Image (cartoon, rainbow, N blue to C red):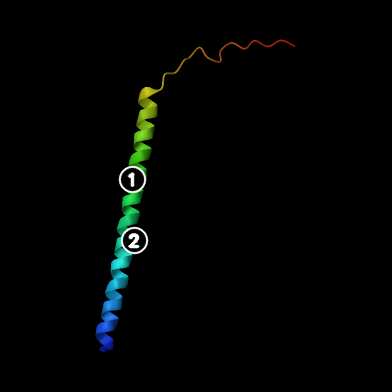
């Protein structure tokens, strides 16, 4: 068995693994960023604010 070829094969497998993990992290981060952006856009667009809430306090002792 050729030790040089085995070493190169092992290095290639390690490199492929590292690259696939990096790509997966990028995909996960972009998915999280997209979801966060969608949620904030939805909250800004669809929230109805009632300005009369909380202006009067009925306090009796």
Q: Residue at x 35, y 24 (%)?
A: 45
Farthest right residue in view: 61
Residue denoted by label 2: 21
Q: Quadrant of the N terminus?
A: bottom left
Residue 4: x %, y % from top left? 26, 86
Measure the alpha-carbon separation of dots 2 and 1: 15 Å
> In the picture, residue 6 is in which quadrant?
bottom left
Disc 1 secondary structure class: helix
Task: Give left or right: position of 47 versus 6.
Answer: right
Task: Give left or right: position of 25 versus 9.
Answer: right
Disc 2 secondary structure class: helix
Q: Residue at x 28, y 67 (%)?
A: 16
Task: Give left or right: position of 55 versus 14.
Answer: right
Residue 14: x %, y % from top left? 32, 71
Q: Is residue 39 above or below residue 45?
A: below
Residue denoted by label 1: 31
């Amino acid at each position: 068995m050729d030790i040089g070829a085995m070493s190169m094969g092992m290095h290639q497998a390690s490199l492929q693994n590292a690259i696939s993990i990096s790509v997966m992290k990028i995909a996960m981060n972009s998915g999280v960023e997209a979801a966060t952006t969608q949620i904030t856009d939805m909250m800004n667009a669809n929230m109805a604010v009632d300005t009369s809430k909380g202006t009067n306090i009925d306090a009796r002792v």
